[in-house]
Amino acid sequence: MLLIRCKELIIIQANFMKKKYLPLLLTKEIWIKRSQISEKWFESLKNSFCAEFLKLENNFNTEKGYKSVFFKKKKWNKEGSREFGGGISSILKGNLFEKVGVNISTVSGKFPDDFKSKIKGANKDPRFYATGISIVAHMKSPFIPAAHFNSRFIITKNAWFGGGCDLTPTYDINNVRKNFHKNLKEFCDTYNSNYYDVYSEMCKNYFYLKHRNEERGVGGIFFDYLQSNWEQDFSFVRGSGLFFLNYLKDIIKKRSTKSWTKHQRKKLLLKRSKYVEFNLLYDKGTTFGLKTGGNVDAILMSMPPKVLWN
Amino acid sequence: MLLIRCKELIIIQANFMKKKYLPLLLTKEIWIKRSQISEKWFESLKNSFCAEFLKLENNFNTEKGYKSVFFKKKKWNKEGSREFGGGISSILKGNLFEKVGVNISTVSGKFPDDFKSKIKGANKDPRFYATGISIVAHMKSPFIPAAHFNSRFIITKNAWFGGGCDLTPTYDINNVRKNFHKNLKEFCDTYNSNYYDVYSEMCKNYFYLKHRNEERGVGGIFFDYLQSNWEQDFSFVRGSGLFFLNYLKDIIKKRSTKSWTKHQRKKLLLKRSKYVEFNLLYDKGTTFGLKTGGNVDAILMSMPPKVLWN
């Protein structure tokens, strides 16, 4: 029986009362422990991101003489015919962050038939457990890239981590790309000298708009089915969160002072249309989530607040 | 050999030089004739819609003291490895019509393997010919519904018409629904007393956002695989174009005088986010077209020009 004692509880006890929906691994003490630790990490990372974002936003507001703003939180629970779980969506709409959403969720259930063959370890037994965090920030300034980060821990008959981070700048694209990837490589190399090459390539291939023959942004890293050594993998996942939080803080601080023209702002809003196209046409989390009855608000948190199409 | 003598020519001769991509039916005189007649009709309907829209727009501009605007036309040709054809996209961006796109196109080729089993008559022989018109209007006023119309004539080992029209109002939804469907029923009943019931139900089911459990708009009619008697079917298709053109003219004229508040305009822009979600997640023409190398500008002409997400 899984018990969570955090104050901001993702109510997953319901899952554990529906034992038939739990993957077999989760009946073993060690995997219960690992799922608990992962959930707690994602929750604590959520708190760190929210706190830093709020500080950046309200420092900016104080400087500019704007009112302070705050995160709005929505908890959701689901007890469906195939899935049980819940999560928390935290959304901030401000003057620096036009819209930033931080989602955590824990769900267990059965993958649909047409999906299970695509997931490692789910072909014969479609039961799964998944916990994770997902962050998308759309900035008001055309000079600060949109940012995306996520980590997840998934258990079927296998168990693995997935995740990644990437940036989508509208201006100064080459510099953003160069600096971000230099820092990503340094971060990855402290774990494994192959990680950067493999995961940045995966990211490049994933965040790609085939119909336009262009990348969504400047890429980053993207990894999946990470299951070498659990402790090491978990350490890399934690590291990726802290790396991205720090990197983002820096880039936002550096770029938040520059003012912009109407034309530059328009270019940002047009760029966002491709973000929407990617998420609704290709992003597996979005399309799978929406088509299988996921939490609509949490999934569509990634949508930019204001978008133009040509 | 198909020859087209219209001034605004959809250059499909290229197709007909690649005979291996033509469905067998198109080697028969009668089907060549029917494809020609259909193409000409879609082109003439395009001209009628464009002329009426331009008149409405520029009358509005004259009244309000705005400058006149005009349609921008883009021709495109495609000679790919599986598809040959071309089309014309006409786009108007004005003060009454925030953005309206009128597309005609004629393409022949081979359906991709994972698609051909879904198309009548294409399972064993994936070759197809398709000609059609598609219109999407997004209005500046929150009181005028967004409008969508399309007709297509498709030949595989079968040959049939498809098409439909629907409205997406932001305000006064019940009245728009009632009046539109009353008129649609009257129109349909002059052809076949079953059409309205069947096609309005098909429309309701098609333009549905499953993830939100809501209709995109107030529906309309939607038909496919119409192949009872070619002359009668073609007459119904022509009728649907003329019906919708007249209906739209009326509703725009009636509703274009009412001014709106910032709040009402915001509600329109939020409503449009669902239009985008539908088109990119569910609309078969859009997703199939984009994923199989269709003309991106022509396909995404349906995107609203300005959109808000909550």
Image: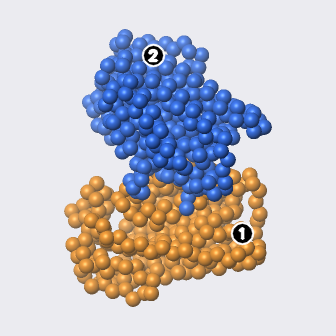
Chain colours: A orange, B blue
Residue A43 position in % (x across, y down): 46, 80
Image point 70% across, 56% down: which residue?
Answer: A265
Kindly identify which residue carries mark 2. B37
Q: Does the rendering let one see residue A280?
A: yes
- Amino acid found under the numbered disc labelled 2: Ile
Q: Nearer the viewer, residue B233 or B282?
A: B233
As drawn, which residue projects farthest toward the bottom? A5
- Chain for mark 2? B
- Amino acid found under the numbered disc labelled 1: Ser
CA–CA distance in space, label 2 to label 1: 59 Å
Q: Nearer the viewer, residue B210 or B28?
A: B210
Name above or below for residue A60 compared with residue B111.
below
State which quadrant residue A152 falls in: bottom left
Residue B89 in the figure: left or right of residue A291: right
Image point 31% across, 57% down: which residue?
Answer: A115
In the picture, the disc for residue A256 is: 1
Image point 41% across, 20% down: which residue?
Answer: B235
Residue A185 position in % (x across, y down): 56, 69
Name above or below for residue A213 compared with residue A114.
above
Between circles 2 and 1, the one closer to the viewer is: 2
Q: Does the rendering let one see residue B301?
A: no
Residue A302 in the figure: left or right of residue A178: left
